[in-house]
Image: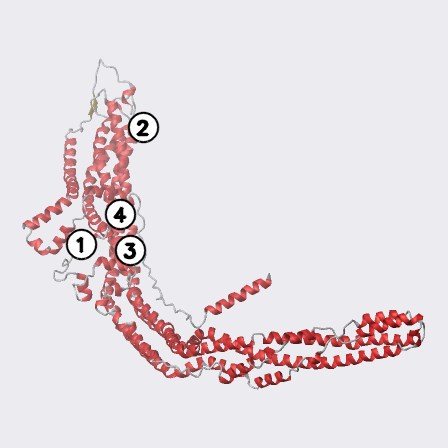
Amino acid sequence: MLLCQLSLSCLLLLGLVACTGPGEPERLEFALPPARYEADVFREPQPLLFGLARGFLHVVLPGALPEDAIRRILQKRLDFIYNSKKPEHVYLIVQIVVGQLGVIFCAGLGLLFVILMPLVGICFGVCRCCNKCGGEMHQRQKKNGPFLKKCFAISLSVVCVFASFGILCGFLANQRLRTQIKKTGNLVNSNFKDMRTLLNEIPEQIKYVTDQFKSTKTRVFSDLDDIKTLLGGGIQEPLRPRVMPVLDDIMAMARVITKTRGALVSLNKTLEDLKIANAQLMASLQDVRQKVEDSLNDPICFQQSGAAACEGIRRSLSQLDGNANPGQLPSLDKHIDTINDVLQTDLSGLVQKGNKSFNDIPEMVQDETMDIILDVKSKLNSLSSDIDKVTQQLPLQDKLSLYLDYLNHTETYFDHYLPLVEKYDLYRWLGSLIICEVLTIVVVFYCLGLLCGTLGYEPKATPARRGCISNTGGIFLMVGVGLSFLICWISMAFVVLTFVVGGNVEKLVCEPYHNRKLFQIVDTPYLINEKWKYYLSGLVLNNPNITLTFEQVYSDCKKNRGIYATLKLENMYNISEHLDIRKHTGRINKEFENLKINVNNIILLDDTGRKNLLDFSSSGVNKLDYRAYLAETSKTPTKVDLLSSAKDLDAKVRTLPPGSLKDSLKINVQTLRNLHRDQVIPLQQTMDSAHRGVKELQQLTSGMEAKVTSILASLDSIQDFITSRISSIIVEESKKYVETRIIGRFERYLQWVKGAITEQMASCKPVANALDSAVDIFLCSYIIGPTNLFWFGIGEATFFLTPALIFAVKLAKYYRCMDSEDVYEDSPVPEASSFTL
């Protein structure tokens, strides 16, 4: 398991090494450091109560924004003021009035309420003082009196609940507006800080761009200095799969020649030893036969007791002879001399020489590109000054610096008046709080009147005999009525004022700002300046005919795009022309197009090496009669096994009677055994060695001519390929080297510079944030939202307090103690249930 993991790790390592070869340069990544802005333009979700005021406004102002009317009024504002009786102007006035009918109607009702409420209150007071309008402290008893009292009490309770809800909305809106005003300082400061960050980050971003050029140039200079490996190695790579196998085959053939010579010498020596050993064995066997034959002349062999044994021994003597004849095999000296002549040429050295000429390609590339590298480095240094010039000529900082004084003045203005706003808002808060509290007091008096009147009511008591608590409840109700006459018209006046202002701002500013219709109106051609088609393009670009709109600028800034693209500054300074990639890199390309590398001296194997291979293939070693050598060396040294012969002879000798014959024959039996041990076994080993040597030599020289022919054909092919294709390979690799290592890096850098300047540098999100903060957050969310809820709540409370006033006056008659009452002598006193609530 551990071995498998180790093998896998090695394969992964080799893969990583292969992936980081000279053909794949390390990619440089560029990215402007992001600017950090503090302004939080997230609009907090408003309570559901705020939707009530907006819903009421949609009912009052259901129509869409009168865009055409607004455009015409703004375009002819002076003429509209001084010549308002023109038919065209009258039509516009009619359009405005129609669009504002709901507001006019509601405001008219409110003003009518403001006028009539105090008048009615005065008349009501005077009338009451004259004992009219219920001022007379006398209550006529009616059969439906208890029912009316219940109806008035329930109606007043319901009206007080609705009025309380409106007052609660007023309290909530008043406090929220106060809280939001206090948060304005942080909102303003963070926006001003972001605007200053926008102005201050431009020099830092320009410096970052130039620093990245230095990094790119350093990397390119490193690649130029390493041209030996990058370009030289690149030229070698297409040739290596073709060259190295041929050189390896030639080197293998050189080793075959050396091995062949060694095999020939070894085999030749083995054959010589075999011949000598075989001759010695033959002589030894002849001597044994002769001695046995001499011994068989003994008289015992002619007697009946030994004749049979002697005859058997005599017949077996013919088998004591040699089986092999290695002397007939030809000597290998001639072939050894031929191979020695072949080895006079150092084929391995010639192969190494050819390999060196191939491996010297990187050195040749480095030597022949020294001048070009110096020229390219010089041009890159000049490109550095061009980049600095482009970044310094960018109009970003100039355009933004024009607004620096305005920014400082605005910030000073806010710093001076914002405390005053907070101070005067305190007065507004107190005034609104007083209105809410007075209305609350009115409702409280109504509630106290209801509570005391209900708890103190005595069913059996007549109107003139009502208790103190009940009478107090009636007084509370009348106090509430008096306060209503005093305060309701004031609160309604405040409601009318805030309604007209807040409602129109919501419908004419906030909603159009959210759906971008406000920008469409402002972007109307010739609207702000009658001589400029597009005001913003005339102000920024000094060319009012270029389409540069407030909506487009706001949208781009909202997406955090750079000022260059947002304000279309290419109409003032076209960076595409100044950062034309081909203009800067064309000079570098021309240098490498003229690159000429002389590779004519790449000779993989010279004529001497070729002749050496041909001499070896024609040496005849492969044409030896290997069959005869193998047949001869595969034989046994003797015709029969000497040990078996000795055993058989020994058995026959044992049948002979004792005597000199038997003793001499026993000596010969031992001699045979010694011959097998001392001569036959070594000779057999020598023959086996010779047999193996013949097979080895046969294997080495098998197909030798075909192999040499194939090697020479491959050598000619790759040599022709080098001669014919090396120029195109140099051109291709030089182009690849320049495009990926030199021009490619600068193209990526220049493209990034162009994108960074047009899309990222001086990202104008603070501008959109400032506008959102001023309109959406401050005006609409902080001011108009609570203001609309305030007038809606106070208006609703004031509206419901009007019927409450009537119910309270009516109900007070049933709670207060009357001065006189109706007396009916014949009528019984009313039942208790007739006076219960």
Q: Is residue 156 left or right of residue 259?
A: left
Q: Which disc number belongs to residue 801?
A: none
Between 286 and 192, the one nearer to me in the picture: 286
Name which of mark 1 and mark 3 comes first in the sequence: 3
Provide the residue designation for mark 4: 786
Provide the residue designation for mark 1: 521
* Residue 190 percent location from the top left of the image: 31, 60
Name which of mark 4 and mark 1 comes first in the sequence: 1
* Residue 33 percent location from the top left of the image: 36, 66
Name which of mark 2 and mark 3 comes first in the sequence: 3
- Dot 1: few (<14), some (14–19), or many (≥20) neighbours within 10 Å? some
Name which residue lies at 29% across and 45% down: 172
Are dots 1 and 3 in contact, CB under 8 Å?
no
From this viewpoint, which residue is outermost toward the top? 826
Q: Is residue 832 left or right of residue 99?
A: right
Q: Which disc number belongs to residue 184?
A: 3
Q: Nearer the viewer, mark 1 or mark 3?
A: 1
**Numbered disc 4: secondary structure:** helix
Q: Is residue 388 left or right of residue 322?
A: left
- Dot 4: few (<14), some (14–19), or many (≥20) neighbours within 10 Å? many
* Quadrant of res 520: bottom left
User: Separation of disc 2 and disc 4 at Cα?
Assistant: 39 Å
